């Protein structure tokens, strides 16, 4: 049993791409070894990565494939053997397969009898196979962005390949990848180890050898190392904790080979800047961790401290640490200073005075500027507000319209040009600072939430209405110029916008339906169906993928209405609650049967009629009575949205329905009986299908 | 920055702004690079100089470095912002094709500027670059030194709308940032540009450039005459287009001699395109380019730049075969 090591040495790979590529390379090597019958059952695969390398260590690799027998298929038996005598065709095939005619045998296939030859295959060595197959596997790894580097452009990869290590135990497998022949020499940390090659003596000693060269090749180890170092550095500031930030931890994990952490400080005066700005500068621009007061509970507003943590890709002495701390603090200070400069500068032109300049900011080339967009949004918001008023929603209409009008004006501010990721938030902060009132400020601040389906919706009614108006306007306008999403293509993130609308309607108390929102958008009749279908599909996604309802329940509730989002959810919840009951399933099965019968009747041209009691069987009369008795109750419960009770009531129909189908032949030969029966079941279906189409429920 | 306070004391032994440039130039000269003087037409970045834009096209190897003053009118701040300039200095280096140890060479060049990497934290972080008007893009990094971006390192993949083969490495050092960092000053204007070796008297960035930052900001933002800028733009464009039309005919003319093709003034044509690019930036700073116009105007510049690049490649081929 051997160990196989492959290391691809690269110039710094983008941090965001490393984890995926490491996993993919591991899988490709593992699949290759399995495919080629080169792994022992106890084999173990470990992957490694740093910004400068991707590596795979496979322990328990066979040095060569076992010999095998393989049957090679030849011509049809009839052609190869005439009356049991081999023909020239048989001889030619045997020769080609490396067998004698005597070795040929008859093989039964689905297409008839064929000639087969057993051929012995001598197993190839692992090295031989790896030499042939590895380059293809490595170069097939997916990268979000590739480059050429060699003259003649023979291959593309994320960054130039600079060295390759390939070892079977201690023996080099001289595979050639991107023009580089593998050896046993890796490289250590650029500065801490320098240019001296790191010779890997044994495949299994890979991680250890690199550790001696100041490279932690194991990602989990590096992650743990960084977390511990962040904790340790935090302890030097009494009463502080570092702000947890998993994506940032992942980023720095993939930016370092030998991570250490330093604490830096900034002037407390910068704490006057909004926390959003400070954290964005630290996290997004500098990849620093913010520090906050550990005393403040996590559910209340946090309090930043004038310190930061930087993860370095080096280890240095006191002198170096002082220089690095000073340098990082200097950069941060300059950025904060800039931010403050922009903040002060922006105040010279209040948001209200920026409206006109939105004419110079493109919303969409074919549609117009944000000035145009804002005018459209105002029209949509006006219609939505009127509809919400009818539904007795309480909100400050003047504040809403002001928020809609000013929502995008922050696009013209210097601070947003500098920190584009803070658009909306900056607008909200400016609105507050400029005395436009908390309602306006909050609505503007929240306008892009929910940014994802996990995100919370705006906390105020004004914010919710602004969010609805802006998004539905975008969707309808984009659909209007042929930019509706298709398949995996959704360049304008319209699905995300529609998801947000569904989520706001679902989780706010707004008395608005999807129909109201679509109508407010002013969409023309030609475009309306497409937009409605699009929202229906988004609601379906929301119920299924976000709320976790099964597809049959989703179909059942959507079949009777996909307009009122909260009502649809309530019906789905009630359905989920009764779903397990045997009575309910039986009734659902009966409804499916009713639907089938009605369809058959229609195909045969049988008409239902008003049921004539005199024509009905006893069990049918029972059903008729029970249905008439229950219908008003159900209607009443539905009215009150007491769906769970309503469904429980419907389930009580079971014995009556069962008896009916046991005894009654619906499609009776007698036309009057038949049409009465059909009228009866049609009425039953109608009475009880107001909350969901139960026939959609999978009962099997 | 013009303040009444004395400039912070910069260590009398620290390298001056010009020292840093000398060292970088010497370092790359010793590695076989042509050291060019800055290009004398306004450009927004060192990439736009013909020494980069045209030299990277075609198969011919080339190594060149130059310190290019780069003008971005909209970035001007009247000399009031300690970190932003209308005109900054890029040390631009092109290595075509890139040697396999290009990153190591780059690190040595930092050491040559007195940066002891043992005492600093250095990271190569993904940053891809593109110049749409030049039909140019590449992948690479921003090089971060103690949290400061000091260099843009790009592997050019396409230029003038053409796929490059061989590709080249482009290193763009932000000289003001590096100098402020090494001299440990918070404002660019406090950078010591030169120091008299005998008296120790210092000349600062403020002394050399403040008036220029102020006056160009005033011109770019307030006084440049929009109508005339458009006139200039249109006239430079017309001249460039006329030349491009001529060269297209010439290069496809089988009867034209190689000599005739070689002497066609494509370099002047490219300068006209650069003029247009700069005028566009001025108009932009004046807020004179409307939304609807913007894409169109960039497209016009692109037509010129890409047109020259295409003709240039053909001209070089003609020269090689002649």
Image: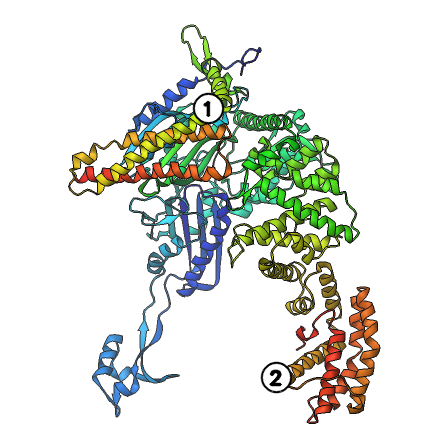
Q: Secondary structure at mark 1?
A: loop
Left or right of A381 on screen, residue A612: right
Question: Callout 1: few (<14), some (14-19), or many (20+) C-alpha neighbours within 10 Å?
Answer: some
Question: Callout 2: few (<14), some (14-19), or many (20+) C-alpha neighbours within 10 Å?
Answer: few
Q: CA distance from mark 2 to mark 1?
A: 80 Å
Chain under disc 1: B
Tell me the residue that label 2 is attached to.
Answer: A603
Tell me the residue that label 1 is attached to.
Answer: B225
Which label belongs to residue A351? none
Quadrant of residue A334 in the image?
A: top right
Left or right of A697 on screen, residue A93: left
Residue A27 image offset from top left, x and y in percent: 46, 58
Chain under disc 2: A
Does A110 sit above or below residue B141?
below
Does B102 sit above or below residue A247?
above
Judging depth in this view, the residue of B131 and B249 nearest the camera is: B249
Quadrant of residue A137 in the image?
A: bottom left
Q: Secondary structure at mark 2?
A: helix
Left or right of A294 on screen, residue A288: left
Residue at far top of view: B199
- Residue at x 73% of width, y 52% of height: A387
Judging depth in this view, the residue of B31 and A63 nearest the camera is: B31
- Residue at x 56% of width, y 34% of height: A417
């Amino acid at each position: 049993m051997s160990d196989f090591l492959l290391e691809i040495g690269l110039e710094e790979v983008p941090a965001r791409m490393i984890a995926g590529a490491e996993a993919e390379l591991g899988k490709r090597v593992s699949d290759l070894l399995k495919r080629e019958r080169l792994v022992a059952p106890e084999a173990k695969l470990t992957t490694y990565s740093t910004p400068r390398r991707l590596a795979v260590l496979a322990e328990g690799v066979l040095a060569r494939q076992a010999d095998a027998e393989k049957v090679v298929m030849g011509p049809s038996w009839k052609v190869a053997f005439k009356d049991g005598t081999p023909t020239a065709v048989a001889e030619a095939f045997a020769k080609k397969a490396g067998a004698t005619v005597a070795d040929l045998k008859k093989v039964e296939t689905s297409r008839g009898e064929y000639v087969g030859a057993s051929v012995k295959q001598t197993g190839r060595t692992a090295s031989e196979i790896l030499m042939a197959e590895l380059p293809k596997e490595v170069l097939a790894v997916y990268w979000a962005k590739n480059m050429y580097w060699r003259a003649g452009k023979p291959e593309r990869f994320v960054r130039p390949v600079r060295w390759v290590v390939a070892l079977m135990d201690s023996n080099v497998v001289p595979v050639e990848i991107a023009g580089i022949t593998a050896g046993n020499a890796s490289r250590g940390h650029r500065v801490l180890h320098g240019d001296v090659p790191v010779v890997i003596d044994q495949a299994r000693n890979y991680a250890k050898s690199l550790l001696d060269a100041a490279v932690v090749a194991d990602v989990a180890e590096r992650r743990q190392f960084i977390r511990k170092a962040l904790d340790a550095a935090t302890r030097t500031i009494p009463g502080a904790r570092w702000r947890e930030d998993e994506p940032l931890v992942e980023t720095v994990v993939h930016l370092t080979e030998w991570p250490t952490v330093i604490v830096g400080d900034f002037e407390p005066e910068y704490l006057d800047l909004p926390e959003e700005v400070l954290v964005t500068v630290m996290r997004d621009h500098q990849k620093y961790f913010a520090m906050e007061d550990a005393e403040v509970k996590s559910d209340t507003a946090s309090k930043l401290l004038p310190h930061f943590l930087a993860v370095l890709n080096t280890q240095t002495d006191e002198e170096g640490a002082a220089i690095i701390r000073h340098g990082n603090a200097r950069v941060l200070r300059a950025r904060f200073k800039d931010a403050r400069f922009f903040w002060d500068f922006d105040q010279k032109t209040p948001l209200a005075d920026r409206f006109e300049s939105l004419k110079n900011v493109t919303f969409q080339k074919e549609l117009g500027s944000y000035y145009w967009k804002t005018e459209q949004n105002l029209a949509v918001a006006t219609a939505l507000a009127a509809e919400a008023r009818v539904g007795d929603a309480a909100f400050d209409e003047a504040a809403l319209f002001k928020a809609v009008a000013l929502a995008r004006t922050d696009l013209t501010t210097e601070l947003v040009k500098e920190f584009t990721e803070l658009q909306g938030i900056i607008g909200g902060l400016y609105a507050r600072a400029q005395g436009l009132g908390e309602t306006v400020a909050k609505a503007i601040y929240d306008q892009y939430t929910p940014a994802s389906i996990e995100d919370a919706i705006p906390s105020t009614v004004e914010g919710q209405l602004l969010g609805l108006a802006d998004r539905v306007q975008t969707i309808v306008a984009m659909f209007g110029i042929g930019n509706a999403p298709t398949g995996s293509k959704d360049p304008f993130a319209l699905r995300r916008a529609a998801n947000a609308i569904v989520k706001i309607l679902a989780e706010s108390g707004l008395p608005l339906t999807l129909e109201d929102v679509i109508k407010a958008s002013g969409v023309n009749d030609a475009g309306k169906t497409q937009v409605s279908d699009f929202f229906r599909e988004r609601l379906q996604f929301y119920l299924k993928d976000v709320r976790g309802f099964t597809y049959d329940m989703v179909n059942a509730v959507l079949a009777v209405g996909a307009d009122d989002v909260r009502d649809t959810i309530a019906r789905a919840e009630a359905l989920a609650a009764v779903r397990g009951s045997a009575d309910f399933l039986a009734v659902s099965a009966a409804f499916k049967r009713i639907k089938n019968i009605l369809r058959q009747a229609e195909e045969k041209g049988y008409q239902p009629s008003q049921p004539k009691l005199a024509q009905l069987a006893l069990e049918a009369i029972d059903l008729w009575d029970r249905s008439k008795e229950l219908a008003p109750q159900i209607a009443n419960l539905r009215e009150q949205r007491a769906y769970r009770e309503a469904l429980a009531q419907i389930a009580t129909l079971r014995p009556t329905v069962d008896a009916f189908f046991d005894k009654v032949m619906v499609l009776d030969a007698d036309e009057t009986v038949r049409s009465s029966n059909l009228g009866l079941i049609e009425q039953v279906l109608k009475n009880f299908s107001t909350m969901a189409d139960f026939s959609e429920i999978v009962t099997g | 920055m013009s303040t009444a306070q004395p400039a912070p004391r910069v260590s009398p032994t620290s390298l001056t702004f010009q020292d840093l440039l000398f060292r970088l130039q010497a370092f790359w000269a010793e590695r076989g690079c042509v050291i060019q003087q800055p290009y004398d037409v306004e450009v927004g970045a060192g990439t736009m100089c013909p020494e980069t834009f045209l030299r990277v096209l075609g198969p011919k190897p080339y190594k060149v470095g130059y310190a290019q003053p780069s003008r971005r009118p909209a970035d001007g701040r009247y000399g009031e912002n300690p970190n932003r300039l209308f005109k900054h200095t890029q040390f631009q280096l092109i290595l075509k094709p890139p040697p396999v140890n290009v990153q190591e060479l780059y690190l040595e060049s930092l050491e040559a500027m007195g940066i002891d990497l043992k005492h600093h934290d250095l990271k190569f972080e993904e940053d891809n670059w593109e110049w749409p008007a030049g039909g140019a893009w590449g992948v690479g990094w921003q090089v971060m030194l103690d949290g400061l971006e000091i260099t843009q390192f790009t592997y050019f993949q396409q230029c003038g709308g053409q796929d490059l083969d061989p590709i080249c490495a482009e290193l763009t050092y932000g000289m003001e940032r590096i100098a402020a960092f090494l001299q440990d000053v918070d404002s660019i204007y406090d950078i010591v540009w030169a120091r008299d070796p005998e008296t120790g008297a210092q000349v600062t960035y403020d002394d050399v450039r403040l008036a220029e930052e102020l006056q160009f900001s005033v011109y770019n933002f307030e006084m440049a005459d929009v109508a005339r800028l458009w006139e200039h733009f249109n006239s430079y464009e017309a001249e460039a287009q006329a030349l491009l039309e001529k060269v297209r005919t010439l290069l496809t003319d089988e009867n034209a001699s190689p000599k005739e093709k070689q002497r066609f003034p494509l370099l002047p044509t490219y300068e006209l395109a650069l003029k247009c690019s700069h005028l566009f930036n001025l108009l932009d700073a004046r807020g004179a380019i409307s939304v609807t116009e913007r894409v169109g105007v960039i497209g016009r510049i692109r037509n010129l730049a890409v047109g020259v690049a295409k003709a240039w490649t053909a001209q070089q081929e003609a020269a090689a075969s002649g």
